Amino acid sequence: MPAGRRWIVIGSLLAGLAVATGAFAAHGIYDVFERQYRNAEPRQVNGEMLPLAQKYLRDFKTAAEYQMYHGLAILAIGLLALQRPCRTLDAAAICFLLGTILFSGSLYLLTLTNVRILGAIVPMGGVLFLAGWGLLAGAAWKGDDASGSVP
């Protein structure tokens, strides 16, 4: 399968799963969090003390949002790669995919398990997102072709 089509499939799946997790966040996970974290200490978020269930609901929704953004970015990379395959585009898509797994995946797991060490993984996903956006900008700026050379 050509890289462009592969990225379109992966981006579409990530975006679709983001819709599903967002719907779960909007229609049911708060009750799960409320039961699971009923006796947990509140956490401070931006100077505001929040019950852990509310904080984790926000974190879960953030994970779904970032998954959607980067699923759509991967989809766009796939469309671009169909027109002009480029190793730099592939690298950007890989960064977005790995960033989504680390950022969104660790936030989902953190909120569902309260294993706080998972919070240390989230920034690694953020760094991969930044690298992906930089690579995408670089690919557009340089106009790399499939061989990686600049025309």
Image (cartoon, rainbow, N blue to C red):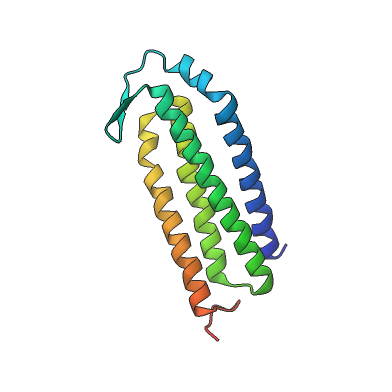
Q: Quadrant of residue 55?
A: top left
In the shown orientation, is residue 62 left or right of residue 7?
left
In the shown orientation, is residue 7 left or right of residue 148?
right
- Tell me the quadrant of the picture where the C terminus can be found: bottom right
Residue extending farthest bottom: 151
Residue at image point 42% right, 18% down: 37
Residue extending farthest left: 47
Residue 84 vs 77, above or below: the answer is: below
Q: Quadrant of residue 49?
A: top left
Q: Residue 34 location in percent, x, y?
A: 46, 17
Q: Residue 141 location in percent, x, y?
A: 49, 76
Residue 131 vs 24, above or below: the answer is: below
In the shown orientation, is residue 129 left or right of residue 46?
right
Residue at image point 52% right, 43% down: 65
- Tell me the quadrant of the picture where the N terminus can be found: bottom right
Residue extending farthest front: 48
**Residue 114 in sight from this viewpoint:** no
Residue at image point 59% right, 41% down: 18
Q: Residue 61 location in percent, x, y?
A: 50, 36
Residue at image point 61% right, 61% down: 76
Residue 86 vs 22, above or below: the answer is: below
**Residue 79 in sight from this viewpoint:** yes
Report the label total.
0
